[in-house]
Image (cartoon, grey):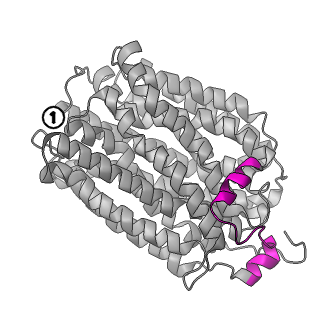
Amino acid sequence: MNPRYETKRLTFWQIWNMSFGFLGIQFGFALQNGNASSILQNFGAHVEELSWFWLVAPLTGMIVQPIIGHYSDKTWNKLGRRKPYFLVGTILCCIALLILPNSGAFFIGKTALFMGAMFLMLMDASINVAMEPFRALVADNLPDKQRTLGFSIQTFLIGLGAVIGSWLPYILHNYFDVSSSAPAGQVADNVVFSFYIGAVVFLIAILVTVIFTREYPPAEYELIHGKPENESAGLGQIFKDFSKMPKTMRQLGLVQFFSWFALFSMWVFTAPAIAQHIFGLPIEDTSSDKYREAGAWVGVIFGVYNGISAIYALMLPAIAAKFGRKRTHAFSLIAGGLGLISMYFAPNKEFLLISMIGVGLAWASILAMPYAILAGSIPAGKMGVYMGIFNFFITLPQIINGIFGGPIVKYIYGSQAMYAIVLAGIFMILGAVSSFYVQDATTISMNDRR
């Protein structure tokens, strides 16, 4: 960064508008996380197959995010540098949101399952296209002293969007009398309409960011961040950048591995785990009204952890300023690990609301602290590509979990998915231990609180 030219401090509402699109992204992501496993089981997927279907998420992220990051570093047009990717990703995701829950109405049997998986892949790819440039946008537009605040506001909006998205099917059924029942092989109306609403919210939220956020034009960006190296380099430059990644990124990679391995297990296996372990349903029951009730409760508890994360995110800048980013992140991950493990001991479904408090603390920190630590160590002009490369440490553990998680649940756990949740809790705590070995290249000052 050129010391003569610094990124201007932004007001709270400028940071809010810049991050508001993430509310829409997470609204759609929450609908996927809370309902995709149940939808695929409605279409005929077995519990041990779920992690394989969910593989499309990390696989598309691993491919898409570094490429989007690479090209968004080099893009400039009337919309800006990062904003064109927000818009394209949003339009594609809205299409997937409209079609995914209707796959069972258009097709039957294995064809419906295959098409559901295809639209899940489209949804994942488009969310990645929209999401990756947001991390770079915060780092582009904020000085280091405001980055913890920027990522925290982003995390608050993520939590807010996720709460609404997670609870929406439950709200539509219980307060608006939208049916939660459906014939075998189809998705209930309360879930279908939730996906429709999600598409509208996603589009509106992204438009707020696109319309009200200014990006630095190339000349001004260069004065602040420096001239990018090898500006005309092609995609092969991604591999060169990967080999030269900052030390802090490598250290954070292990933390991310444990954290995202745990999160993947939680998203994939919570629905069958609760159906079996809490509601007492047999393994083969994947379409009864009782199973749909268990699926709706997953949306409720996922909304709770996202709500906790939204509140905790606003506290993170002050906590990190006092105790340091690493200690803050380690504490949060321990809380998440204990929350996941406690689900095994839950005497009833209401107890799971308490379990989700710890998960919410971990989720808020996972979405903010690693990026705040990382941003200060990234070379000039490489913010987009390195934020994309950093996604490898998110997608790789999910891919490994996706390949082996299902067979482990079937052959080692006897198809009892709750044991996968316990293992997730252990991995979350291992991530906390790894946090202490990360070198934070920047110093947090009290200005972070402002």
Quarter of the image with the C terminus is bottom right
Residue 138 position by quadrant: bottom right
Q: For this rendering, which residue is in front, 395 or 323?
A: 395
Magenta stretch bounds:
219-243
Q: For this rendering, which residue is in front, 450 or 402?
A: 402
In the image: residue 411, left or right of residue 440: left
Q: Mark 1, residues whose alpha carbon is within 10 Å: few (<14), some, or many (≥20)? A: few
Q: Residue furthest left?
A: 183
In the image: residue 429, left or right of residue 267: right
Q: Give coordinates of residue 266: x percent, y percent.
A: 45, 33
Q: Is residue 16 above or below residue 25?
A: below
In the image: residue 316, left or right of residue 51: right
Quarter of the image with the N terminus is bottom right
Q: Amino acid at mark 1?
A: Asp
Q: Residue furthest right?
A: 4
Residue in view at x 60 percent, y 45 percent: 392
Secondary structure character of the magenta stretch overall: helix
Q: Is residue 357 shown in magenta?
A: no
Q: Is residue 192 above or below residue 117?
A: below
Q: Give coordinates of residue 411: x percent, y percent.
A: 37, 15
In the image: residue 261, left or right of residue 190: right
The residue that mark 1 highlights is 289
